[in-house]
Structures are given as C-alpha cells and as structure tokens.
C-alpha cells in the first residue's frame, strides 16, 4: 500500500469516526439544546455566539432587532450554557462559541441584521 493511499484511508476513517460520534450524540444533545433555548432571544444569542463577538456586541445586535436584552444577560446565558456543554470556550478569553449551528439541526433562527459580524454602534438600528 502506498503512503498516499494510507493517508487517504486514515483520513476517511477519521471522517467516519467524527460522523458517527456526532450522530450518536445528537439524540441527547438536540433535546438538551431545544430545552435550553426556549425563546427567540435565547436562539438568537446562541446563534450569534461565534467566539468572536463580545456579550456587548451580541446584546446590541439583539436589541437592533427590536428585542430587549443586556450584555449581562448574554454573559449569564453563556455561563449556564457552558455548564450544560452547549457552548465551548473561544480562543478570546471571556467569549464562547456555539457547538453547532441551529439551522444545521433543524431549529429556525430569528432574523438579525446582515451586518451582524461587526459591532452595531450605540443607538443605531440596522435593517436587513
């Protein structure tokens, strides 16, 4: 067997292992996630938690959609979700990253401004 074929085979096996691990975890993870994300605000905050945005940025984006929340609420949700293993620590200290996109598991995500990756200036409301 050539080295190239061995590497492809190992890569395929790793991909298959990852698939089956994710597949087996979904039966417990999805109900836990849907139970924790009961409101549109919860879902929106979870979806915006990408490890790059701060709690303040996420709160501003949520508020720009006409919903009300604060950065303190976002931080409290992150703490709760960390204990439930619904988010993982991000590379930037004090931020978290969602484990999976909600849409990828069939949960609809409320709409938010298309420029959401950047901080929304105080008081500015953006539209899609």
Image (cartoon, grey):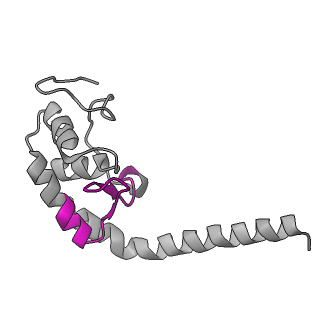
Left or right: residue 64 compared with residue 86? left
Instruction: Inspect this view and state whether residue 108 appears.
Output: no
Left or right: residue 53 compared with residue 125? right
Residue at far front of view: 93
In x, y percent, where is residue 99?
38, 61
Tell whether position 85 is magenta.
yes
In x, y percent, where is residue 77?
16, 59
Tell whether position 29 is magenta.
no
In x, y percent, where is residue 79?
18, 64
Residue plotted at (26% across, 53% down): 46
In x, y percent, where is residue 123?
10, 25
Residue plotted at (27% across, 30% down): 113
The front one of 6 and 92 is 92
Image height of 66 relative to 90, above or below: above
Where's the C terminus, which quadrant?
Answer: top left
Which span is picked out in magenta?
78-103
Image height of 35 relative to 39, above or below: below
- The image quarter containing residue 89 is bottom left
């Amino acid at each position: 067997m050539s080295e190239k074929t061995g590497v492809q085979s190992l890569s395929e096996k790793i991909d298959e292992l990852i698939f089956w691990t994710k597949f087996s975890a979904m039966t417990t993870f999805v109900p836990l996630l849907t139970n924790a994300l009961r409101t549109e605000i919860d879902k929106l905050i979870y979806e915006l938690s990408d490890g790059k945005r701060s709690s303040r940025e996420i709160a501003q984006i949520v508020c720009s959609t006409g919903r009300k929340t604060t950065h303190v609420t976002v931080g409290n949700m992150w703490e709760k979700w960390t204990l439930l293993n619904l988010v993982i620590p991000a590379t930037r200290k004090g931020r978290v990253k969602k484990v999976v996109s909600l849409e990828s598991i069939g949960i609809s995500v409320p709409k938010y401004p298309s420029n959401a990756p950047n901080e929304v200036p105080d008081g500015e409301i953006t539209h899609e």
